[in-house]
Amino acid sequence: MIKIEKSFIIVFILVSIFACNTEEEIPLEYNEEPIESSESNRYMDALDSKFDALPEEDFAYMNSLPPYDPEELALALKKESQQNSGNRSTEEVWGIGTGRTVWKWNGASWGQPNPAARLDIVEVAKNGDESVWGIGTGATVWKWNGASWGQPNPAARLYHIAVYSSTIAFGIGSNGTLFVTYNGGQNWGYLNRDFTGAVWLSTGSSYPNGILSVSDNIGNLYKYNALTQQLNYITIPFVSNVHTTTSGGGVWAIDLLTKRVYKSLNYLNFTIPNYFTQLSIISSNDNQKAWAIRNDRTVWKTINSGATWYQPNSAARLDYISAAFN
């Protein structure tokens, strides 16, 4: 009898341990789990450590690619800018939550278009169409088809991606090199083989201004000129490590040290619309409206050029966000 009781106790303990170690998927609205980081930029620190572990051979395909064709890119950008891609009703907002889960804002709450999806980055197109791209495990590149995620090119490897449209996107490869595709991700080419150290890039909705902004690993900001095919250094009165371009060639930016918002309509004059601090990510393609995440993972929005901010859903917690307005 004693042996039976001991066996029962052992089995009970083992079952209890297994149950405690089983991960439970937490709904976004009740997700309070923080990501530990010793750096002020919690998201980028977590992402960099994940990609630093990837062997260089994983990027062999990207490292062997030839430069892009400037004329083909210019033609593709011009064609996209002339098309009326008004499929988006008002705004398109996607995010990444705990456990790399993928979420979409429906105007009142957050839901999972595909509960099985797991990504590190999700980016919506900034020119007006409904295209959504993502970066998954092992720096793989994915696209949303309205029901599931697929890989336009299974060999492609990128750290980060910025999406102009369903056909045109820019990415960061190993060593912070820049790449571009203008056929929906099927093929990629070096945007600038000599430029290295990029850590963040984003696109706007207007051509030729606001096509691409890049920040490097020491906080410098660059603007891509689609006409000259050059990356031009932007002299700014602060150090920026996260930003997104807006319509008209402007830019939203986050100060590296204070984590507050800076804003410019021309890349020349930067202002502080509000001393709203502790931001980790900001996203927009509009001069007045933007979404942002603070270091505590709370989600915020402005509709008046950053003068005031509010929480569309105060319970929401995200690690990444991408937004575009029609």
Image (spheres, grey):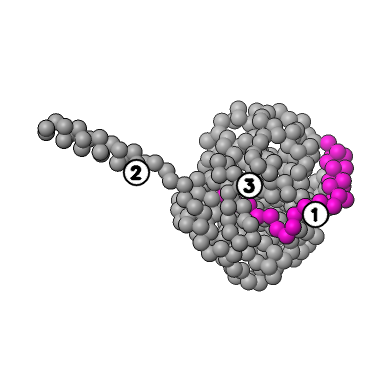
Q: Which image quarter is the C terminus in?
A: bottom right
Quick one: SS at disc 3?
A: strand
Left-right relation of 168 to 31:
right
The circle on residue 297 is none
The answer to if 17 sits in the magenta stretch is no
Q: Would you name the residue on which mark 1 appears?
A: 86
Which callout, 3 or 1, points at the residue further toward the start of the chain?
Answer: 1
The answer to the question of whether label 1 and label 2 lie on touching residues, with beta carbons closer than 8 A, is no
Question: Of the residues shown, which amino acid type is indicated by label 1?
Answer: Gly
Amino acid type shown at disc 2: Cys
Task: Please give left or right for residue 76 compared with residue 260 in the image.
Answer: right
The answer to whether 83 is drawn above or below residue 294 in the figure is: above
| Residue that protrudes farthest toward the front in the picture | 1
Q: Name the kind of residue labelled 3 in the image.
A: Val
Residue 20's mark?
2
As rendered, which of 224 and 280 lies closer to the eye? 280
Residue picked out by circle 3: 122
